[in-house]
Amino acid sequence: MDSTKIICPNGHLGFAPLKTESFRIGVAQKPDFIAADSGSDDVGPGPLGSDTSTSPLAWQEHDLEQMLLASRELNVPMIIGSAGDTGSNSRVDLFVSIIQKLALKHGLTKFKLGYFYSEVDKEYLRQKIKSGSAITGLDDRPSLTEQELDATENIVAMAGVHPFLDLLEQGADVIIGGRSSDSAIFAAAAMSQGHCEADAYYLGKVLECASFCAEPYGGKETVLGEVNPGEVLVSAMSPAQKCTIASVAGHAMYERSDPFHEQVAGGTLDMTHCSYEQTEENITRITGQTFKTASEFRVKLEGSGKTGERFLGIAGIRDPYTVENVDKVIEWAKTQVREKFGDEGYELYYSVYGKNGVMGDLEPVKHSKSHELCVVVQAVAPSAEIAEEICMTATRQMFYARLDDVKGTAGSVSFILDEVVATSPAYRWTINHTVAIDDPLELFPRHMIEAGI
Amino acid sequence: MSNSKTTSKLSGLAKTIRSKNAGVDKITFDIIFRDRENYELVKNSGCLTRETICQLYGIEDKRISDFVEFDPAYAIKFTIYRNRPSGSAGDPDIFGAQQYAPLLDIEVPLP
């Protein structure tokens, strides 16, 4: 079997632009595929809940243009997974339209543009629950209830290799995928060339975050992965970076609780017996990976639900006595909110920067030495009017806090704005679960169109 | 290293100390060493265990989902459950990327 080479220029396409110099070096290696993941649940539940992207359109277009032109120049497939941060249907449509426009702009010869969706209908899951097929919780969450389902705005399923493989078999030159496992995007490419699942998924695992598997630290640079039977080779394309045993093995455990296993739709990549070898200064070779097919085909689901409209308030404190007594200041303001709005039906949070604003309860430093504090107030309520009034009360009442021995009696806090600010609504991850399905393709409808002229 | 020095901060022994989301319900911490020597030193020191982490972060053992020594990368890694899913209102660190700082100052006895 021939070796298969894939380049990945960006670990989250759109979140920040790819670096073109190392990308061009990667393209000059004549890879068989150009692929990148464009999504992450790291961005929080907001984009999925509101069906928007957190990445700016200009950066999405920049990377898609670079990749499309290189893909057409080499006549090799380009594959994108988890389009537009969330992989929802509207994000897939957005990326498909960008590819179509770019093809016209550059007068590209006709090519096959395949895409698939990942959104899951709530009623489909409700039927599963009713029929007794549990939507099982991940990370110790309980099984999904109809109540939590009702509280959910949008749901996506995490595709494995299957819809990508199907579109590649249909001859797609460019694939825009809905929500997908990061590693599956690359694994599908390798499997379409006959490589086994173990090698293909390891290749995907190591390439998915682009240059995060290289050192020194530097994102958005291109890396090259090569797979041969039984081995994966990875190298950095930026002249400033190298793929070392330390950087590659270190990446195997990035963003995961278990460094030995990667769960994907349909099975598990087992890295327990992987060995790492420096074959050249910039090339690390990985062997020993295995893949175990799951007895039941389960697919991960992500769902986001709106918890309310949100306002932010900001206040500063400089008086050392007030700094010392910030908890009393906050308690005073909270009491004023409670007097009008009661204890329930809203959420109110104070983040005290200079004390424990970043870590909250996890902060081991219990006595801050800061000479000043910044208090950020967040209020969430069913309507914008109520959220604004709660946030205003909770912020402005700090100004009127009654402290016994304070010298300054004209106001207990400073404001950079004498107002509170509307932000995006608040959302939460309602679904982090898996569902059993019969056909690996059933949640991922696929389409093929032509683009170019 | 001077003879009088009997301990070193973890930040002086490790190459990388970081925290990051592991899915939406957990934050994972990586302490990665450049060489086997420092890795083994810290691993065997008893300074970085489930118990010391609970003490440092003021959490109960059940909040730690995993504690792993990962030889191929000379790394010690642990993962904790979040109080609320990432990005919910009130979550101060959507990416979980700034939760590692207390690890930097762990004092490790030198041989």
Image (cartoon, coloured by chain):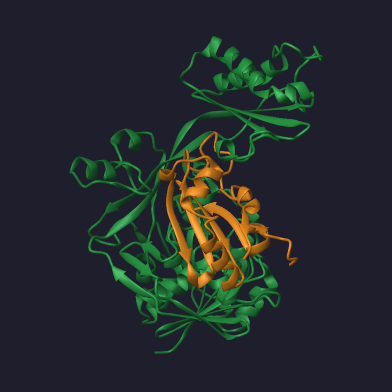
Q: Which residue extends farthest bottom?
A: A1
Q: Which chain is green?
A: A
Asked if A356 appears above or below B27 in the picture, the reply is above
- Horizontally, is A382 left or right of A237 in the view? left
Q: Which residue extends farthest front?
A: B4
Task: Report the residue at 44% width, 73% height from top.
Answer: A202
Asked if B23 appears above or below A163 in the picture, the reply is above
- Horizontally, is B23 left or right of B39 in the view? left
Task: Report the residue at 46% width, 54% height from top.
Answer: A87
* Any part of residue A113 in sight: no
> Depth check: A332 or A71 in front?
A332
Q: Quadrant of the C terminus of chain A?
A: bottom right
Q: Which chain is orange?
A: B
User: In x, y percent, where is residue A38?
Assistant: 53, 59
User: In x, y percent, where is residue A450?
Assistant: 46, 68
User: In x, y percent, where is residue B57?
Assistant: 54, 43
> Depth check: A437 or A411 in front?
A411
Q: Quadrant of the N terminus of chain A?
A: bottom left
Task: Report the residue at 77% width, 14% height from top.
Answer: A406
Asked if A168 appears above or below A420 in the picture, the reply is below
Q: Which residue extends farthest left?
A: A131
> Depth check: A434 or A169 in front?
A434
Task: Report the residue at 53% width, 70% height from top.
Answer: B73
> Depth check: A33 or A133 in front?
A133
User: In x, y percent, where is residue A185?
Assistant: 45, 67
Image quarter of residue B90: top right
Asked if A161 appears above or below A408 in the picture, the reply is below
* Any part of residue A394 in sight: yes
